[in-house]
Every structure is written in C-alpha cells, then in structure tokens.
Image (tube, rainbow, N blue to C red):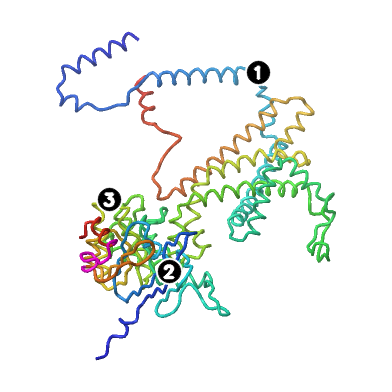
Amino acid sequence: MSSLLAKRRTTQASTASRTPTDLAGLKIRPRIGVAQWLSIALAVYLGLASIQFFVFNDNWKWDVVFSYLFSQIIINGLLNTIYLTLLTTFFGLILGVFTAWARMSPLVVLRTIAILYIWLMRAMPPLVMLLFVFFFGALAPTLGIGIPFGPTFASVPANEVISRFSAAIIGLSIYLGAYSAEIFRGGILALPSGQFEACKSLGLPPFKAYQKILGPQLIRVIIPSLANDVITIFKSTSLVSVIGYTELLTTVQTIYARNFETIPLLVVAVIWYLVLTSIAMFGQARLEKRFGRGFARRNPSDPKPAALENAGKENL
Amino acid sequence: MTTNLKSETPLLQLVGVSKHFGALKAVDDVSLDIRSGSVTCLVGPSGSGKSTLLRTVNMMEEINEGAIFFEGKMIGHEVHNGHRVPVSKSVARKQTLNFGMVFQHFNLFPHYTALENVTAAPMIVKGLRKKDAEAIGRRVLERVGLGSRMDHYPSELSGGQQQRVAIARALAMEPKVLLFDEPTSALDPELVAEVLAVMKGLAEQGSTMMIVTHEMRFAEDVADEVVMMDAGRIIERGVPQEILHNPTTPRAKKFFASVGAL
C-alpha cells in the first residue's frame, strides 16, 4: 500500500516537471479504480469458496456421480430427452409460425381461433396439458374426421394413436406453439413499417417478402426469446414423467428411489442439462452472428474487455 | 398541324381522388394529369395531403373515392356486377410495378449489401438469374454514382448514399413512373445536394417523376409543373416560375413566403 502511494506521489511530481508535449505523448491507459480491485478480490473469494464447497466436500459423492454419468441407462434417458426436445421444438415452432400468422390475419375467424388457443395454453399448466393429452382416450374413445353430430368418414381408436411418446410430443408441442406464436408476433410488430412498404412498393409477394426480407430481420430480433423457450423445453420434458415416459430426470428418479443416492444422481442430471444448455447457447450465438449481418456489431455481454484485461496485467 | 398525341394523352390520370382517415379527409377530390416524361413537384405545408396523394398512386393507400388511370386503364379497382371492387392482390402487385417509390427514410433492407438491395426484387419478382440481376444492379448503382460502394451494407453508408441506393433499387425494376416521398427530408443539409443531383439527372434523361418536396429551388429548377396542396386539395398549379413567384391565392402566397421562395 505504501509503495502504491509513493508511486502516485512520483507521478504527480513528474506531471509538474514534464512539458505539455511530453505529457501529450504519453499513452493513455484505463484507470484502475477501487471497483476493479474489489471485483478481483470477490472473484478470488468465490473461487476458493466453490473449491471448498465442491471439491473438498465428500457429501457430493463424486465417485457415485461419475459411475453413473456415462452409464447406459442414463445415456438412454438423455437421448430420450434430446429426441423429445428436438421433435417438440420442430413441431412447436411450425405451429407457432402458423398461429402467429393466424393471429395477425385480417380474417376475424382465424384471429379468434388463434387468440383462444393462446389464451387456453397460457392458462393451462403444462403438467395438466400432458395428462389431458395422455388420457384423451377417456374423453374421445375414437379420433375421426367427419361432420359434428353427423357422419364420420374415417376414425381410429384414440388409444392406438396416443402412446406415452406421442402424448409427450403433442402435449409439449402445442404448448410451445402458443408461446412461440407470441414471440413471432412480437418480432413482426418490431419490424419498422418502412420494410413492409418497401417490399410492397417493389411488388414482392408476401411469402417471398417474409422469406427473403422480413424473416431474416425478425429472426435476428427473436433469437434470444426463442432460445429461452427452447431451453425451457429441455427441462419441461422432465414433466413427461407423470405419464410414465422415461427421459433423463425420470431415469434418475427411478435410480435414486432404489439406492437413495438422491443428490449424486440429481447432480448427474444437472451436469447433462448444463451440457445441453451449453450446446443450445452455442447454437444461439452462431445464429445471432449469422442473422446479425449488416447490423453494427455490439457485444453487450462483454462491455469493457480491454480495460479488464489491462487491469489484470498491471497487477502482476 | 398534327399534335403529338402521345404527349397529349396523360400517362397517369387521377380523377376526383379522395382518401379519408376516419373523419379527416387527407386527400379531398383531387384530379391531376401526369404526362409522360414530365416532372411534377407536389408542395405544401405538412399535413396538406401531398404524401398521401403520392401514396395512393401506387396503392400504398387505398382510395375511398375517385379513380386512378394508368395508360388509360383504371388501376386498383375493377368493375364487377356494376360495382367497383379492389383488384386481386396479384393484379395489384403487377400494377404496382409501373411505379418505383423512394421513401423519406430510405427503407433499405439492412441485412443486404447495396447490390443485394438492388438485385433482390429483379430476382424475386421478375425471376432474373443472379448474373443478369447483378448486371442491372451494377448499371443502376453506377448511374447514381455508387459504383464503388456496391458491397457496403446500408449501415456503412451515409444518408445521402443510402438514399441513392434506394433510388437505384427503384430504377432496377424499370418502372414507368418514379414516385419520391420527401426524399431529402431525412438528410443532413450537406447531403441533400448529391441526392437532388441524381434526381435532376433522371429528370433530364426523360423519366416521369412525381416528387413530394420542400426544396423549392429544386422544384423551380427541375419541375415542369408545381402542384400546391392545402387541406387535401390542390389550391394552385402551373409552371414553377408562376406558382412560386406569383401565386394568386393568399394561402399559397403565405406558404411560399414562409419557405423563402417569394
């Protein structure tokens, strides 16, 4: 501390003796203030605390964690989670696009159907939705195409169509469909009206305008919210345990129900969820870069990288 | 003694056109003829309906009364069982292609380079191959003096350059009439001249142009006819020298005095 003060004094002394030209020639560096020192201290403290908590803490039973992490049964559950997430995302986003389109349609009937659907899905807990879909056979023993109160042209027993797997996909997809519809709609509303006018004045048909001009611009805006919803689906897939479909979390639960190693097995699930989320976030970053074409680069997660780097170096 | 019939028949004809926004009559019973190769400047105070009138021409605004004729044929509506109904969307798109529009705020596609902005519509709408569209794109960008900026994104161009790309984008579709909606109003003063120079060049090459503008000196220099609007109506029209320096109505006198034309 005293050497630091001494250094500051000499700096001040030299200010007086130097000519303006000398001073103007000196390189400018970021000022390292109290906040930087405190934040470094905090980082060191948190680092040490986490090492103590995670590494020197036998209660985690890391040996149990690692013995299960890559075991066949866990990997099977993981693959089911991935499979379910991919299919749900695929069908959910398609449904979302159509719902957003219907929601913004000039036709009042389409708009009303979309609003009712979104309203229902927002009100319904996903768990209840899954149970409704799974037990749909109790409400409608046969599924068919026909005229209400009139003849039926074709039908199949509901229980043949609805398995644990298809119920999980249908339940989660119609859920994501409603939520992503509002995200798509938000993206369309966020586009400047001038873009629609430019497309119209050039005679672009609406589908082409969305595909080439408006779509890429709105995707750029909605990627963060959409990624949020898709990552949420990873975890929502654990809800399908209520209808007995075995994905990652259900697998883990069945194992610790037998051997009582609850925490190590939950850690196994969390590690895999972290891996999946990392992959999704990596994909999100790639997409953001791709659709950021033509827009000034900003990096909101990293406001002053140069300053922090220099602060670290000057310490040493 | 034969008069040139082609220049006598107006290319574009507005007959009793009105456009309402609720109770407001933004355009009120306007009739106007535009000859082929002529430059018409629409002037007037803000809110006088000149932009709305311009936007009715290429169906950016639907009209409530009157009719618009292009090359003698009614556009925007068709007769159906003794009534007029709006034309189908695909017919409307075809009719729109007779007009190229330049907007106050450029409305360039931000994710496309200057060249891609210009080639998008020829490729998508006219189905041109990329090579052919790019040949047209290069030609029109050179015409607006941006041959060296083709690979720049709009965010990397100045306002004046962006507006010139927007003009090139309209030109690439080879429209028969160019519509300019306050093309220099969003520009810094030192960038106005480059855009006006491009527009003057187009006028000299015989383009038919309708221009909503506040640049009175440009109107005087380039326009064949100046149309002054107020409260949705045309209150005065004629050759620029007469209108700008010798307006007859008190309202026009007051307006031209306030913009420094008198």
Circle 3 sits on which residue?
B188
Circle 2 sits on which residue?
B129
**Disc 3 and disc 2: Cα gap in Å?**
37 Å
| Nearer to the camera, A302 or B243 | B243
The chain under label 2 reads B
Residue B139 visible, this angle: no
Circle 1 sits on which residue?
A58
Residue A240: image quadrant is: top right
Q: How crowded is mark 1: few (under 14 residues within 10 Å), some or many (20 or more)?
A: few
Tell me the SS state at disc 1.
Answer: helix
Q: Is residue B222 magenta?
A: no
A63 above or below B178? above
Q: Find out whether the residues at labels 3 and 1 contact each other: C-beta distance under 8 Å.
A: no
Total label count? 3
Q: Which of marks 1 and 2 is in front?
A: 2
Residue B150: image quadrant is: bottom left
Q: x%, y% of residue A38?
A: 43, 18
Q: Give the range drawn in magenta.
A: B241-251
